[in-house]
Image (cartoon, rainbow, N blue to C red):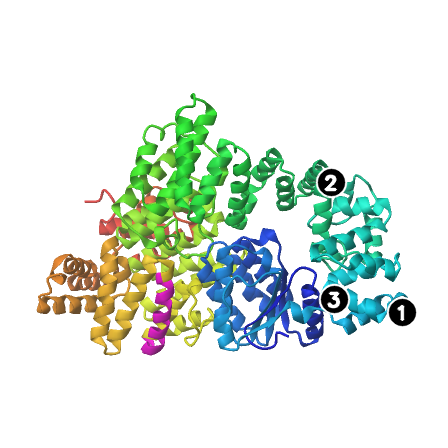
């Protein structure tokens, strides 16, 4: 079983031994170290983030130590990455496993989320040849398998293959109760096999009943009825032979999805849970261990269903009260997922709302938005949520992309607030609504709606729930503009206007440390850099750097430091740029955040390539662990594009172009504007470099068309003289063709870009300045500011605070300043500066 093809499915109703078969096969295969994941699913796994996190977790625990670190990065991707990005990365990591491996997903029928179905089908489609998936389900698979069958890549095990025949029934009964089975006739075996249709659970129940019934008595009752009635009869038969104490224990604990001694004691109000569990194990009463220590158990699903059905039918109020007791127990022990599910089963929606309110931040951090929506939808359909929880519902819907329902809830809440009398609660609700609407605006571009709502309340908003203030919008991107908060690279005057207004309001009300304030500001900072408004970008970077949150939150720190290094490199200050990255890398390493280190190394390689230091750049790229022959995965796009730049310097254009072509498809799927512009630019450069000028111009036209819509500048300038020359060629060819479209806005855009590059006379002036005996190299504005700070007697710490830079950066600036002035102390620097007349106020 399972050794051939992509997927093997075991499809049969409950109780036919699907899980047992998988377990026996797993045990048989264990000596070959083949099975790398086993996941038993339940209803709560109907959340794509939760589902795939559990799959990765199952893989992680069973892998050799040297492979574990690779799968840690997969877990870190969730929930920040799209499903396509995550699955491509998972497939890549699976392809790197050294031997044949299996992933077992048991009870797939409980998963009804269509996204998970689509994801799973996609995964199976592109599985590496040495990876196999085994699925068990009570129902047909939720996706078509015809294409895999045609390719002979799918195998099925059906109910008919799992049914016991007469001989297997005899052997089974004999293996359990040899002395009893001697009194069973061949005819009774035939009748039992026929009536149960080889249903192993019925046979197991029958075998239990044989302990206290004669074969004649048992088989007389078994004959007649369908499986459901047969199962209920047999459960009743087994239950009737148990003591009242055991029956009561089974009924009450059947409400538990998982049980240990403490949980059993909580719902029974007794203290004999451990003793009873031990007895049930001895009786072989469908108790399934969930861990190797035999601490946690569950009942066989079918057995639990029969018990719960009986309890609910005979004692509905007791059934609900037991769920309340279970919920209270799990809540007291911090297992809030279980507590909330039990409260919902109890139909105690006040309690469910209480649990959810205390638990929602944790689930939000886990990224399980589908789970949150499920709970909120269910509770709100039976119970009126508080205004605050309704607003949180809208926030989650925005994050999941359900803008229509989010808008409906927001509009209703805005009407409610408008009719509320002035109070602190009203002000807090309006404050929170402003945040939620802002998130909605940043995703759907409906700026007019935000302006209308914000009028009249901006000056009255007050500090509010940290859910909205401190939600981390970036878990993996080296630049915020690549996230949904950064609008995937979209830039416009509207986004600037709303961003400035929003950050000004937050700052005015003391929320400079809130993550939403800093992320919006970082988006603006990166946008200004792209628009080549370097001073504006530098000013915002300095403001962000003063915040403690920017240091504590790596999703903010890494983009900030990369932007600061870009600004330094744009001024030709590569020493400072390298220092910024080195300093940041040490900080990240001290926190054991190795995933972010790769992004920093990739950026350092880009700096080295700009300096034409190919040897050192090659070392940095080698440390990234990506190869030109690999299939590119979009989760490592920043690193792969760095590799492509290196391949271009090495005149390995075909390898680079292959990577770009594959990566571009993924960028389009992710709707990443910034990535599409960058990829098209690199395609243009590489094609032209290898002599394919026409193709190069086609790709450049793509980049220009998209870039002009958003005012991109630095994406072109940072590619250096090669791009300057290419743009000049493009303009000349357009003018020769007298292309009406090219002669219009696009050609104007090209000419504007050309003027942004350093002009020849500027280069000559810079060279002349280097030859001036009195001042070997011109001072930048920042270095002049530094000199004036020194003249005022400021310490390094004070200078850092005044210029919004770190003390380490100030030390680098001082070193560079001393080199330019050819001095070694502060005093010498002041004397030399005064002699040159370059200090502020000098004539």
Q: Nearer the viewer, mark 3 or mark 1?
A: 3
Circles 2 and 1: CB atoms closer than 8 Å: no
Q: Which residue is mark 2?
A: 314
**Image coords of residue 13 (percent x, y):** 65, 61
Q: CA distance from mark 2 to mark 3?
A: 32 Å
| Membership of 249 in magenta stretch | no
Vertical relation: 571 (above or below) 382 = below
Q: CA distance from mark 3 to mark 1?
A: 20 Å
Q: Nearer the viewer, mark 2 or mark 3?
A: 3
Taking 22 as reference, is 559 left or right?
A: left
Q: Secondary structure at mark 2?
A: helix
Q: Residue at coordinates 32% horizontally, 71% vertically from top-left?
A: 612
Q: Secondary structure at mark 1?
A: loop
Pick whichever, 67 or 538, lies toward us: 67
Whether residue 803 is visible here, answered yes or no, is: no
Q: Which residue is mark 3?
A: 194
Range of residues picked out in magenta:
649-668
- Please tell me whether the stretch drawn in magenta is mainly helix, strand or loop: helix
Sequence order check, earlier mark of 3 and 1: 1
- Badge 2: how crowded within 10 Å, few (<14), some, or many (20+)? few
Q: Secondary structure at mark 3?
A: helix
Vertical relation: 375 (above or below) 278 = above
Q: Which residue is mark 1?
A: 182
**Image coords of residue 239 (percent x, y):** 81, 50
């Amino acid at each position: 079983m399972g050794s051939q093809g992509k997927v093997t499915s075991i499809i049969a109703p409950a109780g036919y031994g699907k899980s047992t078969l998988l377990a026996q096969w797993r045990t048989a295969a264990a000596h070959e170290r083949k099975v790398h994941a086993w996941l038993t699913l339940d209803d709560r796994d109907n959340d794509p983030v939760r589902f795939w996190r559990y799959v990765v977790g199952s893989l992680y625990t069973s892998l050799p130590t040297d492979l574990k670190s690779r799968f840690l990065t997969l877990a870190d991707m969730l929930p920040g990455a799209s499903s396509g990005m995550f699955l491509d990365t998972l497939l890549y990591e699976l392809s790197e496993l050294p031997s044949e491996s299996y992933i077992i997903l048991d009870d797939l029928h409980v998963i009804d989320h269509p996204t998970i179905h689509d994801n799973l089908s996609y995964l199976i489609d592109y599985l590496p040849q040495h990876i196999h998936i085994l699925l068990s389900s009570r129902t047909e698979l939720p996706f078509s398998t015809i294409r895999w069958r045609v390719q002979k890549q799918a195998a099925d095990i059906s109910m008919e293959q799992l049914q016991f025949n007469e001989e297997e029934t005899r052997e089974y009964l004999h293996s359990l109760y040899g002395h009893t089975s001697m009194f069973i006739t061949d005819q009774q075996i035939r009748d039992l096999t026929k009536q149960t249709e080889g249903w192993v659970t019925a046979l197991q129940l029958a075998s239990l009943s044989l302990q206290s019934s004669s074969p004649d008595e048992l088989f007389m009752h078994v004959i007649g009825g369908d499986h459901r009635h047969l199962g209920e009869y047999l459960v009743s038969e087994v239950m009737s032979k148990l003591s009242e104490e055991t029956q009561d224990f089974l009924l009450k604990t059947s409400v538990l999805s998982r049980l240990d001694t403490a949980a059993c004691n909580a719902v029974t109000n007794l203290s004999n849970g451990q003793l009873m569990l031990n007895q049930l194990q001895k009786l072989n009463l469908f108790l399934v261990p969930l861990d190797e220590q035999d601490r946690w158990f569950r009942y066989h699903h079918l057995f639990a269903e029969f018990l719960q059905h009986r309890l609910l039918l005979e004692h509905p109020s007791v059934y609900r009260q037991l769920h309340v007791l279970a919920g209270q127990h799990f809540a007291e022990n911090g297992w809030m997922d279980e507590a909330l599910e039990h409260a919902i089963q109890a139909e105690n929606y006040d309690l469910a709302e209480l649990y959810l309110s205390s638990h929602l931040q944790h689930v939000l951090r886990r990224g399980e938005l589908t789970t949150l929506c499920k709970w909120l939808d269910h509770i709100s359909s039976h119970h009126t949520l508080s205004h605050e929880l309704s607003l949180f519902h809208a926030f989650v819907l925005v994050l999941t992309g359900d803008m229509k329902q989010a808008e409906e809830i927001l509009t209703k809440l805005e009407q409610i607030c408008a009719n509320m009398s002035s109070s602190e609660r009203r002000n807090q609700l309006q404050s929170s609504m402003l945040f939620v609407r802002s998130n909605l605006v940043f995703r759907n571009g409906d700026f007019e709606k935000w302006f209308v709502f914000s009028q009249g309340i901006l000056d009255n908003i007050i500090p509010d729930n940290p859910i909205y203030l401190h939600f981390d919008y970036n878990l993996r991107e080296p630049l915020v503009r690549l996230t949904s908060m950064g609008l995937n690279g979209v830039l416009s005057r509207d986004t600037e206007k709303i961003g400035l207004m929003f950050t000004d309001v937050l700052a005015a009300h003391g929320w400079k440390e809130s993550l939403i304030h800093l992320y919006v500001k970082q988006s603006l900072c990166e946008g200004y850099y792209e628009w080549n408004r370097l001073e504006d970008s530098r000013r915002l970077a300095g403001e962000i750097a003063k915040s403690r949150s920017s240091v504590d939150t790596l999703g903010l720190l890494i983009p900030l430091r990369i932007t600061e290094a870009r600004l330094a490199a744009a001024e030709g200050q590569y020493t400072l740029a390298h220092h910024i990255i080195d300093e940041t890398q040490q900080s990240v390493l001290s926190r054991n955040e190795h995933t972010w280190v790769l992004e920093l190394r990739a950026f350092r390689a880009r700096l080295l390539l700009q300096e034409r230091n190919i040897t050192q750049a090659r070392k940095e790229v080698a440390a990234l662990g990506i190869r030109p022959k690999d299939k590119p995965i979009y989760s490592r796009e920043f690193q792969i594009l760095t590799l492509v730049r290196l391949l271009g310097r090495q005149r390995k254009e075909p390898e680079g172009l292959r990577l770009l072509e594959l990566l571009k498809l993924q960028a389009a799927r992710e709707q990443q504007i910034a990535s599409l512009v960058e990829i098209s630019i690199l395609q243009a450069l590489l094609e032209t470099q290898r002599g394919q000028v026409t193709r190069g111009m086609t790709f450049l036209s793509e980049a220009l068309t998209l870039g002009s819509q958003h005012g991109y500048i630095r994406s072109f300038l940072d590619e250096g003289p090669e791009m300057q020359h290419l743009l000049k060629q493009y303009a000349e060819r357009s003018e020769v063709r007298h292309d009406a479209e090219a002669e219009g806005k696009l050609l104007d855009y090209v000419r504007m870009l050309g003027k942004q590059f350093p002009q020849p006379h500027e280069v000559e002036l810079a060279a002349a300045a280097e030859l001036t005996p009195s001042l070997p190299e011109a001072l930048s504005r920042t270095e002049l500011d530094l000199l004036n700070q020194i003249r005022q007697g400021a310490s390094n710490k004070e200078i850092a605070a005044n210029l919004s830079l770190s003390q380490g950066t100030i030390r680098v600036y001082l070193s560079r300043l001393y080199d330019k002035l050819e001095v070694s102390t502060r005093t010498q620097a002041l004397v030399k500066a005064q002699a040159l007349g370059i200090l502020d106020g000098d004539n």
